[in-house]
Image: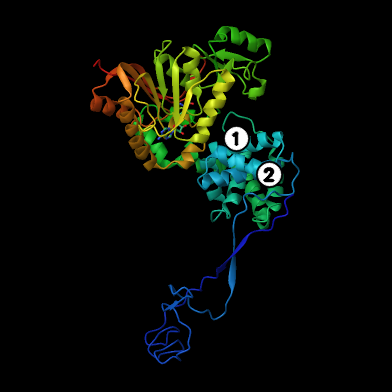
Amino acid sequence: MTDKRPTLTLKPKARPARKPAPEGAARPWATGGQGRGPSASAPADARPRRGETERDHAGRTASREPERLRPSHEVKIVPQHDYRPDLKADSLALSLLGAASAVARVRGGTALPQALSSVFSAYDVTPQARGAIQDIAYRTMRQLGRSEVLLGLMTTKAPEPPMLGALLCAALALLDPPPGTNPPYEAFTVVDQAVDAAASHPDFAHAKAMVNAVLRRFLRERETLGAQALKQPLARWNYPQWWIDSTRAAYPNDWEAILAAGNVHPPLTLRVNRRRTDAEAYLRLLADAGIEAARVGPTAVRLAQAVNVSQIPGFHDGVVSVQDAGAQLAAPLLDLADGMRVLDACAAPGGKSGHILETADVDLTSVDADPARLARVGDNLGRLGLRAKLVAAEAQDAGWWDGRPYDRILADVPCTASGIVRRHPDIRWLRRKSDTLQLATLSSKILDNLWQMLLPNGKLLFVTCSLWPQESEAQAAAFAARHGAIRLDAPGQLLPASGAGQDHDGLFYALFQKPAA
Ligand SMILES: C[S@@+](CC[C@H](N)C(=O)[O-])C[C@H]1O[C@@H](n2cnc3c(N)ncnc32)[C@H](O)[C@@H]1O
């Protein structure tokens, strides 16, 4: 256990509200000689009072707070997300607390993968505990709307600090799994361990009885509370209201299926490296290894159960890569041939760069604005034994370009990622409605800039993992109109699907050709 004490900041206690003084009565701080407050006739050495100013040693003007009749302070606790409690490494209590810490960080604006890595390094946990923390955090994210509504029905105000609320949401996600799925732990274990988790943390040990009471009440009244909660769209769909409204407006017939698809646990889909083998042969290899799988695309194989990549046959040797079946459409759409000059303009972590190089012997430049993410392109291509020129740059700038035009350009632009929420259940809680317009503005600049880099007759493939038309079809139509681009056949908007023969995220594809010079 890390022996850390709570970090305290001292905040002056708020002054109690005063009753308005009766007309004509002396007011404590009134000037003008009335009452006991400072007056125009106050002694010259009197310290400045409320609203007055004084100069500090550097000569800056500072306003002074009024003196207090009874100086006192209240303690404001800075939340200790990194506090490592003295709990067993393999206990559910520690996993609940780790998940709560990650969820509280997401609520503070951090993406879940980063939040989890901070928790893992702060807690220094075993691989098993990491798995459990990650599983609980993802479950909690998928059910956050429902759990927060349930908490609202059972408590009079939002639990403080936020990590306490997150702990309760994490426990509720385990007690109240989605319909048709089994609870991962016994209910009494979850309650018991959540109480232990609360008791072990200095920020909310005082609330352990509340944690016990809330979770037991949920178990006693789950039918009534569940029915009441479901009246609220936030609980029914587990998305913020603006997200539900946007989906409904864009897809009046499909919005419910789309929202439901985003709450499903995603499959693990692999791309078979056609330089090494083909999908049928790889399926046989999986069967021999006792791994059940099905083909969901020309090179796409979906595993029945997700496994660690270390257990995937041939993964470390570059025989397969992890990639959604929908994302595997990009390289074939580019219509590649050996010897072409190809640009992957927003390339990290390199899924599509790898597929391009598996498809043909091309001269590939992979650009990404984020150098750390770009390094992952190098790692992923290294595993596949393939090479590209890596450039850390912004795709809306041309400063990095050597002036030699490309035969093919892939623009997999930054977007709201509203089509891949089943893989990233935190996105819905992190995004704001205004992000859509901001990202659409950036991607239109990227597209305009890349167009000049394309050869006449060359092809540019515009891809987003968004469901919002402002980022996808409206963007594509406006781009074609601005540049007189020829629109070729491409899937357009793919809605998220999970079924027997097909299983993919919600992606958008538009393919353009530059008119001959
Ligand atoms: C949808 S992801 C790309 C996924 C990638 N094509 C793949 O298949 O693995 C978008 C990428 O755009 C990058 N990005 C964001 N803004 C950018 C910009 N202005 N210029 C270039 N890349 C940018 C992000 O760092 C991110 O890696």
On the image, which quarter does residue 131 sit in?
top right
**Is the residue 311 above or below the residue 233 in the image?**
above
Percent position (x, y) of residue 118? 61, 43
- Using the rendered image of the protein, determine whether residue 169 is visible from the camera's viewpoint: yes
- Amino acid at pointer 1: Pro
Quarter, ligand 1: top left
Q: Is residue 190 left or right of residue 438?
A: right
Viewer-proximal residue, 346 or 116?
346
Q: Residue at x 52, y 46 (%)?
A: 107
Viewer-proximal residue, 452 or 18?
452
Disc 1 from disc 2: Cα separation? 26 Å
Tell me, for residue 123, which label it has, or none.
2
Q: Which residue is mark 1?
A: 177
- Amino acid at pointer 2: Tyr
Q: Residue at x 68, y 41 (%)?
A: 95
Q: Say what secondary structure mark 2 lies in.
A: helix
Percent position (x, y) of residue 147? 55, 43
Viewer-proximal residue, 260 or 72?
72
**Is the residue 213 above or below the residue 53 in the image?**
above
Q: Is residue 209 left or right of residue 235?
A: right
Extreme-right residue of the structure: 88
Mark 1 and 2 residues: CB-CB less than 8 Å, in contact? Answer: no
| Mark 1 Cα-neighbour bin, 10 Å: few <14, some 14–19, many ≥20 | some
On the image, which quarter does residue 34 sit in?
bottom left
